[in-house]
Each structure stands twice: as C-alpha cells, then as structure tokens.
Image (tube, rainbow, N blue to C red):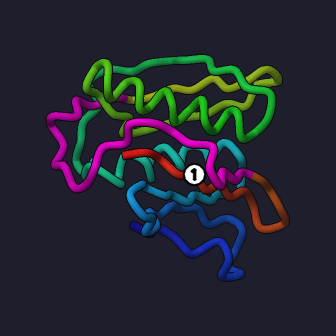
Amino acid sequence: MMTAADPTSGRDRAERGHRALPHTADLRIEAWAPTREGCLAEAVAATVEAFADPAGARPSREHLVELGGAGAEDRLVALLDEVVYRLDSAGEVPVATEVTWLPEGLRVRLAMADAASLAVTGAVPKAVTWHRLEFGGGPSGWRCAVTLDV
C-alpha cells in the first residue's frame, strides 16, 4: 500500500509514506520520510499494514522501549524485530509509533492495539532479514527497504 509520493519520483522532501512490494515467498517493504525517525515510524506502519488493517484501531496500551544498535540498519532491524516479537508474544501491534534517535540506539513509544481486533489482510511476518536491507539519507530525505520472512 502506498500512502505518499514514491521517494524516487523527485517530489518534495517533506512527503512521507510506505508501501509493500511484491517479493517471492517473503514480504518486502519500503518507507521514506524527511527524517530518519519518521522513516523508522513509516517502516513500522508498512510492516503492520502488510498483514492487517489498522484503520480505526484504538490503542489499548503503550510501551516505551529502548533499543540498541550501532548503525541505522541495526536500529531498523531492532525496531522491526520488536514489532514481530510483540505480535508473536502478546498478540498486539503498534498503531502509532514515535521514535527518538539516541547516540546509543532508539527510544520508541508504541501505541498498541490487540491484533485480534484488526482485519487480517495478509501473511503475518515471522522475522526480519538482513537480505537486501537498506537504510540511508540523502538530499530528498531518508529511505529504507527491508525483507520480512512470512
């Protein structure tokens, strides 16, 4: 699902969004935003929207987590691993995400909803892979792409 202009289209850097891409036997997502924090939040939204419809979901609890990671790619994987872990262990998904970039990692506020309250629209991710992982910034903002095992 695409929610904003494609980052490669040359549109204004202030735009942000995400989409799922066709990928053999897995799930591939892309996200983009003017800031790295915004890009990470969009990656979380893309992950959730790839398998469920969060429209109208109401958060029932909030989690504040600190995640480590030396580089941008490490932090992206740690964040999406947290999303997969929360889904698998507690049956909950983030419907809003706020990310703060710290020198040693991330501080993330996740507003969670019960996964059972959302309509299932696709295969549930089981793990984050390092295959063709991308995360970087440039003149038009930040962009990431990641493959998830389903």
Residue 18, horizontal then vertical, whole percent: 51, 61
Q: Is residue 64 above or below residue 141?
A: above
Question: Is residue 146 toward the left or the right of residue 103 in the image?
Answer: left
Residue 60, horizontal then vertical, whole percent: 26, 24
Q: Residue at x 68, y 58 (%)?
A: 143
Q: Residue at x 58, y 75 (%)?
A: 6
Q: Residue at x 65, y 55 (%)?
A: 132
Quadrant location, the N terminus: bottom left
Is residue 115 covered in magenta? yes
Question: Is residue 134 toward the left or the right of residue 54 in the image?
Answer: right
Question: Is residue 119 toward the left or the right of residue 143 in the image?
Answer: left
Residue 3, horizontal then vertical, whole percent: 45, 67
Q: Secondary structure at mark 1?
A: strand
Q: Residue at x 45, y 53 (%)?
A: 46
Q: How many marks?
A: 1
- How crowded pointer 1 is (Cα within 10 Å; few <14, some 14-19, many 20+) is rated as many
Nearest the camera: 80 or 38? Answer: 80
Residue 72, horizontal then vertical, whole percent: 75, 39
Q: Is residue 65 above or below residue 115?
A: above
Question: Dot 1 corresponds to which residue?
Answer: 146
Magenta range is: 112-135
Residue type at mark 1 is Val
Q: Is residue 119 above or below residue 23?
A: above
Is residue 25 covered in magenta? no
